[in-house]
Image: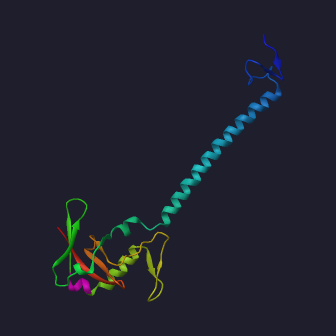
Amino acid sequence: MRRKRGGQSRENPNSCDSGGKTCKAVRAGKIILNEMKNKEFVCVIFIACLVIGFCSCAVLPKSAANRWLEYELPPSKIVYNGEEFFGGKLSGKSRFSVFYDKVIADDADFYYVVLQQDFGWRKKDADTWVPQTSNFRREKIGYIYVNPDKRVAVYFSPPKGNYSAFKVSIK
């Protein structure tokens, strides 16, 4: 038999001598620490889920901003005679084309406001747009934004960013 030192045998340093009160307290302390670590872990996961849940509620839905497809287009390609001047492919086999239409052109201000709101902006006063959320998108000058759902496109022409609206057909 091996000699014991300080209530523990040499063979197993974690074993206690004849059920001493000190050894039981140590084991109980280890159990409590393990339970606390598990509770802390559960609390951290719970808090992370709450943060993700609440943050996702405050963000502009991506679907609103993503309804507008963005394409670079030089002003020399724009025509106002009713002929198709731009086109592309949508998801699937659908294709779209953009052309001038007087009714849509007359409603350009309306479609500009719809685009701005979908991009996460709101009107502060007659001349000022302010971000509605921290997740907003800016229009780019020299780009056309196509919304296949509304069958409309908005173009921002250089150098000042004046906008025009066009009709979109889908085939």
* 120 to the left or right of 67: right
Relative to 128, does residue 46 appear above or below in the rendering? above
Q: Tell me where the magenta segment starts and ends, as one range.
A: 100-105
Could you tell me how many numbered marks the image carries? 0
Query: How is colour applied across the structure in the image?
Result: rainbow
Relative to 93, does residue 3 appear above or below in the rendering? above
Q: Nearer the viewer, residue 49 or 72?
A: 72
Quadrant of res 166: bottom left
The C terminus, quarter of image: bottom left
The N terminus, quarter of image: top right
Task: Residue 18: give x, y in percent of width and height.
Answer: 80, 19
Identify which residue is drawn at 21% across, 86% down.
102
In this view, the residue farthest toward the top is 1
Identify which residue is drawn at 24% across, 83% down.
104
Q: Nearer the viewer, residue 166 or 161?
A: 161
Identify which residue is drawn at 47% across, 69% down.
135
Task: Residue 121: give x, y in percent of width and height.
Answer: 44, 77
Q: Nearer the viewer, residue 110 or 161?
A: 161
Relative to 19, does residue 87 appear above or below in the rendering? below
Determine the main secondary structure of the stretch shown in magenta.
helix
Quadrant of res 17: top right
Residue 29 on the magenta segment: no
Quadrant of res 110: bottom left
